[in-house]
Amino acid sequence: MSEKTVLVTGACGEIGQALVQGLAKRGGYRIVTTDLLPPAEAIQPLTSEHVQGDLVYRVKQFYDYDFDIIFHLAASLSSKAEVATEEAHRINVEGTMQLLMLAAYKSAKRGRAVQFLFPSSIAAYGFSSLEEKHRAGRVKEDDYNTPHTMYGCNKLYCEKLGIYYSRYYGQRHLDPDPPVMCDFRAIRFPGLISAYTVPSGGTSDYGPEMLHHAAQGLPYACFVREDTQISFMAMPDAIKAIFMLMDAPREQLTRQVYNITAFSLTAADFRKRALAAFPSAQITFQPNPRRQGIVDSWPEDVDDSAARRDWGWQPDYDVDRFFEEYFLPEIRKRYKNVRARTNE
């Protein structure tokens, strides 16, 4: 079996590093990575080539490559995107569109579809009030698509762009013998939590931040209310889902954008888990109006029945296994020396 050439954008991010490691473990891939940063230490030996720089200005050089799969992870995330909206649009939309055009061109030229895997987000949803959010419960993909953030708007629009470039670009589907189009597939991820990287200030990071502070004996003021609830997932399950969707036969898929979820927690649930693991933890709640508003616009949970039906999605980590087998053992190990000094 010949080696597949893949491109991973945003390779130095949390998902990017985990994905590159997963691809290397699978084997059979020539991995090309790109990011604003130089290759992270964890992935440097696993990549055949790393292109550093602004993706929007680097896409043209990728026309010299023959990619089989593009994993487009590079993005300006929710909190940052609200501060720098124009820059977020440039990165999130223009960067995605440039890569979709590349995938469409290469698919037609070689007569074989380039797969395009796109991580979308629960930020694509939006509710007019907390009452509406509570009534909605678990939401399906086509409901409440009224995002309240630039990041959510960007993600929703890029989903539509992906569908356009894989079905309708140039209206080539109307030709008697249309050329091959790219194969766009997207997952709307919940809040993702990695045990191996430090939270970077994302809007859904209040849960892991709480535990990281508790493990170090540091006080933590949570920026959302105790009753704030959204869905979460362990990073290994996110990578598993990407591979499952990538491997699924195209004719088996009934849609191109899928919800997935693992467990749903309130901020108070995270505090309870933190206190159980670290009884001396000092955790208070000081909601930030802007960030609280963002999280309030996201669903409490999502309906992932389409993913379960079409490609057999099922998470490995429920809430108990996530904490006891994945997250807590790693952060205890990470901060072992810090806790020892604190107890001296």
Image (spheres, rainbow, N blue to C red):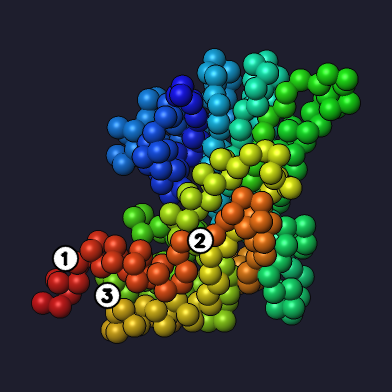
Q: Amino acid at mark 3?
A: Gly
Residue 85 is left or right of residue 167, and the answer is left
Please report the residue visible at 59 percent of the width from the left and 54 percent of the height from the top. Answer: 312
Q: Report the residue marked by disc 3.
A: 217
In the rendered image, residue 288, in percent from the top left (x then y), is placed at 55, 72
Above or below for 53 versus 233: above
Using the numbered discs, state the Cα–Cα distance from disc 2 to disc 1 in whole angstroms: 33 Å
**For the residue labelled by badge 1, is the local secondary structure a helix, a strand or a loop?**
helix
In the rendered image, residue 195, in percent from the top left (x then y), is placed at 36, 59
Quarter of the image where one finds residue 309: bottom right
Quarter of the image where one finds residue 56: top right
**Labels 2 & 3 near each other (Cβ < 8 A):** no
Please report the residue visible at 29 percent of the width from the left and 39 percent of the height from the top. Answer: 41
Q: Report the residue marked by disc 1.
A: 337
What number is the disc on residue 315? Answer: 2
Question: Closer to us: mark 3 or mark 1?
Answer: 1
Please report the residue visible at 73 percent of the width from the left and 47 percent of the height from the top. Answer: 255
**Labels 3 & 1 near each other (Cβ < 8 A):** no
Judge the density around disc 1: few (<14), some (14-19), many (≥20) Cα neighbours within 10 Å.
few
In the rendered image, residue 280, in percent from the top left (x then y), is placed at 28, 84
Above or below for 190 versus 6: below
Judge the density around disc 3: few (<14), some (14-19), many (≥20) Cα neighbours within 10 Å.
some
Q: Amino acid at mark 1?
A: Asn
Quarter of the image where one finds residue 152: bottom right
Question: Closer to us: mark 2 or mark 1?
Answer: 2
In primary-sequence order, the first of circles 2 and 3 is: 3
